[in-house]
Image (tube, grey):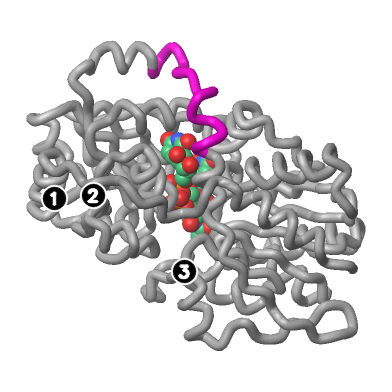
């Protein structure tokens, strides 16, 4: 079976790492049919610390194609991806196209494949914020409707799809086929289970940890609604500066956020701002921090995997079970709410008993379901 995987942005490398490993395990165990994976990188993320470092650390097979699309407006970059992926699909004629999450790379790949009547497998299907201002919400809605396999991490995701009339029919080759909606668990949980004991800090992060033995707040910010609004990014920095009087705040800066801060003329000496870190350094930081503050989807879940309370710098989340369980609190970008939320999370000890995201075998289930398909 020829499987073509399309990735492009940082979180997709983390997710794809687990499925590529499960494909290799399937093949070496004599799984039928053997699956030949070809990876296409759209080039949406391209800095070493945003891309290649993940392939090296996580031992992801190197992409056969890199479309080199880079940064730019949504329509322009998604359009370039669409054209590039279509060309690759026509050359490779895969049996299945595999996509992850909700980025522009996800949508471009799903759309290119659907127009060629190739079956699409979507890992992390069914997530919804119900906020149509988010580019990711548009990408998810469309990708889900076009996909033949909808691999859901949670029961909430399955229910979200049901509400939208899925499973429905999709065109595959000359026929119509019913979508398969499968709750498999979360591949990011698989990744943490596999890599957390292998992760060693880089010398820079090792040195940083030595400076802050009492722990620290770990913060990440990159969501468009925060970086594209001076009020929001200003409010978040103000709150983090206030919190830094309690504990140091370590902030690995997404390039988008670095640019937004520079454009807004916001300089801060009170925060420990560092370049984006690799996955291993991130796992080490998650393990050693006291509380996580983030607007990232993946980092909210990882905080939970590391049993760290999370303060989410958004007004809604796709990972509603974290809020319902008291592991996560939504505070938006308002400085007072951020400070109050972080202070209260610093004092709480949520009981991190239930495993909300599967049993660590999500990637294996994805591969098994695809292998059951006879093209
Ligand atoms: C993208 C995804 C978002 C995901 C995030 C993960 C979309 C619409 N958004 O957001 O869902 O959560 O990735 O990190 O697909 N840049 C660099 N170097 C890089 C990459 C980006 O300098 O290697 C800068 C560029 O100025 C670029 C900006 O970051 O314009 C934004 O990059 P882009 O890929 O458009 O969106 P993200 O904010 O990264
Ligand atoms: N991550 C990382 N280094 C960083 C910030 C994040 O390795 O400096 C990892 C993080 O641990 C998670 C993934 O990148 O595995 C999440 O990506 P991001 O927050 O960019 O995107 P989102 O999950 O919001 O789509």
Task: Locate residue 342, reporting x and y percent.
Answer: 15, 44
Q: Nearer the viewer, mark 3 or mark 1?
A: 3
Give the structural element (helix, strand or loop) at label 2: strand
Bin the neighbour count of mark 2 within 10 Å (Cα to Cα): few under 14, some 14-19, many 20 and up.
many
Bin the neighbour count of mark 3 within 10 Å (Cα to Cα): few under 14, some 14-19, many 20 and up.
some
Bin the neighbour count of mark 1 within 10 Å (Cα to Cα): few under 14, some 14-19, many 20 and up.
some
Q: Residue at x 25, y 64 (%)?
A: 315
Q: Which residue is mark 3?
A: 155
Res. 315 visible in picture: yes
The CA distance from mark 3 to mark 1 is 27 Å
Q: Which residue is mark 2?
A: 311
Where, by quadrant of the figure, is residue 57 drawn? Answer: top right
Asked if the residues shown at circle 1 and circle 2 are in contact, with their CB atoms under 8 angstroms apart, the answer is yes
Sequence-wise first label, 2 or 3: 3
Above-or-below relation of 362 to 93? above
Say which mark, if any, is on residue 364: none
Where, by quadrant of the figure, is residue 246 drawn? Answer: top left
Q: Which residue is mark 1?
A: 341
Above-or-below relation of 280 to 23? above
Sequence-wise first label, 3 or 1: 3
Where, by quadrant of the figure, is residue 369 drawn? Answer: bottom right
Q: Is residue 21 left or right of residue 26?
A: left
- Placement of the C terminus among the 4 image quadrants: bottom right
Q: Which residues are magenta?
A: 192-205
The CA distance from mark 1 to mark 2 is 6 Å
Above-or-below relation of 35 to 155? above
């Amino acid at each position: 079976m020829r499987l073509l995987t399309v990735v492009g942005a940082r979180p997709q490398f983390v997710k794809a790492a687990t499925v590529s490993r499960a494909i290799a395990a399937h093949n070496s165990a004599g799984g039928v049919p053997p699956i030949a994976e070809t990876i296409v990188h759209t080039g949406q993320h391209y800095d070493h610390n945003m891309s290649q470092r993940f392939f090296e650390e996580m031992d992801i097979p190197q992409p056969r194609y890199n479309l080199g699309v880079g940064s730019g407006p949504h329509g322009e970059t998604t359009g370039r991806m669409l054209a590039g992926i279509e060309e690759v699909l026509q050359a490779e004629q895969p049996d299945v196209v595999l996509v992850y999450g909700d980025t522009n790379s996800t949508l471009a790949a799903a759309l290119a494949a659907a127009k060629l009547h190739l079956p699409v497998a979507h890992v992390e299907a069914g997530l919804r914020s119900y906020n149509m201002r988010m580019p990711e919400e548009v990408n998810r809605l469309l990708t889900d409707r076009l996909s033949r396999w909808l691999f859901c991490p949670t029961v909430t995701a399955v229910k979200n799809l049901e509400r939208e009339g899925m499973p429905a029919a999709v065109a595959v080759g000359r026929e119509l086929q019913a979508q398969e909606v499968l709750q498999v668990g979360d591949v990011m949980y698989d990744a943490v289970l596999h890599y957390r004991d292998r992760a060693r800090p880089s010398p820079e992060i090792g040195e940083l940890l030595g400076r802050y033995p009492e722990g620290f707040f770990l913060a990440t910010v990159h969501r468009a609604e925060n970086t594209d609004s001076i009020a929001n990014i200003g409010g978040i920095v103000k709150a983090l500066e206030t919190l830094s009087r309690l504990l140091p705040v370590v902030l690995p800066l997404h390039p988008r956020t670095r640019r937004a801060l520079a454009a807004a003329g916001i300089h801060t000496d009170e925060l420990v701002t560092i370049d984006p870190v690799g996955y291993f350094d991130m796992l080490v930081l998650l393990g050693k921090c006291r509380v996580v503050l983030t607007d990232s989807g993946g980092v909210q879940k990882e905080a939970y995997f590391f049993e760290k309370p999370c303060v989410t710098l958004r007004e809604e989340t796709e990972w509603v079970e974290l809020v319902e369980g008291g592991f996560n609190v939504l505070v938006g970008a308002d400085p007072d709410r951020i400070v109050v939320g972080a202070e209260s999370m610093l004092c709480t000890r949520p009981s991190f008993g239930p495993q909300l995201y599967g049993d660590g075998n999500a990637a294996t289930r994805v591969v098994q379901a695809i292998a059951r398909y006879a093209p």
